[in-house]
Image (cartoon, rainbow, N blue to C red):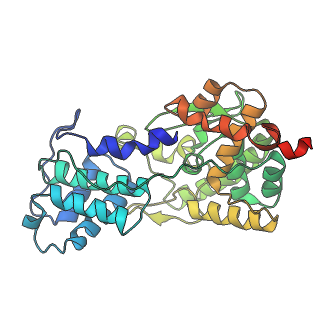
């Protein structure tokens, strides 16, 4: 996994001009630079998070070189190299952060400015080799017991189904199949769908939770709301789908909010910060000193399956990994400590 991740920036820095599968988009010349970036990002159907991130990197890039006009952006090769190198040397950023900055500037020059963007030679940030933090089943049980409400249900899905946090929060009612004891992850990492297991023990509290969610949905409909965000062009193809029960979020937010892009007021899913704060508080409450986060439960899911004899290919499919080498990191985890090599001190 680490070798694959550490080569991402290297591959990105060797990209040649031209992007297969995309036609050139000419942004509105009357718009300001950042507005042009947003316009093309939305035409390309990038997520709101990517839009915010890319715009922030473009803003930092312009400030770094103290550019006063659009003309100063061109030529960009040397400027981009200097910016990326400064991030690595002075900013001491992680390799993933430097890679994200490069992707944002690559998008700026290729898709917005339509300028050549060939091999970029920059000092690379080093990616440290880390092993994932894993909780034992007993520790997971203690953390879950210390939680309540929707955050507890979300953590049960993270550990019971191996979901990423946003995959759990973006679940729709129709993605849960209680009879088959499975759930469907839609548009996961890499824009892929997949099936994963749904623990029997989480089904009763999920049913009870959904009963309350349905009441809230009915109240929203009565108040003239009740529509949720639909991906792509589904809202145009199926105008009434956004108000249907099956499309509602399993974990809706407490309050309605205004969509920053469309300006439509509707109920979105729970914010990740809510879950992360609840996990942090529960871990501290039960006295676990490991640096556990929402992703720790996904790591613990994979490790528990390996310890119980599940094959690596099955775990790869459940986790949605592209490459089995990414999943293999968990075999390293279970070969250590009490479940693997015995310490020579114990043989004295």
Res 261 visible: no
Q: Relative to 302, is 96 on the left or the right?
A: left
The answer to which quarter of the image holds residue 240 is top left
Residue 3 image offset from top left, x and y in percent: 47, 39
- Identify which residue, 290 or 104, lies in the foreground: 290
- Identify which residue, 186 or 257, lies in the foreground: 186
Which residue of the protein is positioned furthest toward the left in this rendering?
71
Which residue of the protein is positioned furthest toward the right in this rendering?
348
Residue pictured at 57% horizontal, 59% vertical: 272
Residue 17 image offset from top left, x and y in percent: 17, 41
Residue pictured at 92% horizontal, 44% vertical: 348
Q: Relative to 144, is 241 on the left or the right?
A: left
Residue 117 image offset from top left, x and y in percent: 16, 47
Residue 255 vertical placement versus 241 (above, below): below
- Identify which residue, 287 or 249, lies in the foreground: 287
Residue 102 image offset from top left, x and y in percent: 30, 54
Q: How many labels does the image show?
A: 0
Residue pictured at 76% horizontal, 40% vertical: 203
The answer to which quarter of the image holds residue 270 is bottom right
Residue pictured at 74% horizontal, 59% vertical: 149
The answer to which quarter of the image holds residue 59 is bottom left
Q: Relative to 284, is 98 on the left or the right?
A: left
Res 300 visible: yes
Residue 52 vertical placement versus 157 (above, below): below
């Amino acid at each position: 996994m680490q070798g694959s991740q550490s080569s991402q920036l290297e591959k990105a820095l060797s990209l040649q001009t031209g992007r297969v599968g995309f036609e050139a988009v000419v942004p509105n010349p009357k718009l300001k630079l950042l507005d042009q970036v947003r316009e093309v990002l939305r035409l390309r159907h990038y997520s709101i998070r990517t839009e915010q991130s890319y715009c922030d990197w473009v803003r930092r890039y312009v400030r770094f070189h103290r550019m006063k006009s659009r003309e100063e952006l061109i030529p960009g090769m040397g400027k981009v190299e200097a910016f990326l190198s400064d991030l690595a040397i002075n900013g001491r950023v992680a390799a993933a952060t430097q890679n994200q900055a490069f992707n944002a500037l690559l998008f700026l020059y290729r898709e917005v400015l339509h300028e050549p963007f060939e091999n970029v030679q920059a000092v690379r940030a080093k990616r440290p080799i880390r092993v994932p933090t894993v909780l034992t089943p007993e520790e997971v049980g203690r953390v879950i017991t210390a939680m309540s409400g929707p955050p507890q249900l979300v953590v049960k899905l993270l550990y019971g189904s191996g979901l990423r946090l946003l995959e759990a929060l973006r679940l729709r009612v129709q993605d849960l199949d209680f009879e088959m004891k499975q759930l469907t992850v839609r548009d996961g990492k890499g824009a892929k769908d997949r099936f994963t297991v749904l623990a029997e023990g989480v089904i009763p509290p999920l049913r009870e939770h959904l009963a309350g969610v349905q009441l809230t949905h009915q109240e929203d409909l009565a108040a003239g709301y009740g529509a949720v965000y639909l991906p792509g062009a589904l809202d145009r193809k199926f105008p009434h789908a956004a108000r249907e029960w099956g499309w509602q979020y399993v974990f809706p937010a407490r309050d309605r909010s205004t969509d920053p892009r469309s300006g439509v007021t509707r109920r979105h899913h729970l914010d990740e910060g809510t879950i992360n704060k609840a996990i942090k508080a529960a871990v501290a409450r039960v006295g676990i000193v490991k640096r556990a986060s929402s992703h720790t439960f996904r790591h613990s899911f994979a490790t528990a399956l390996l310890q119980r004899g599940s094959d690596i290919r099955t775990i790869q499919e459940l986790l949605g990994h592209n490459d089995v080498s990414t999943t293999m990191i968990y075999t390293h985890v279970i070969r250590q400590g009490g479940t693997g090599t015995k310490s020579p001190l114990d043989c004295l």
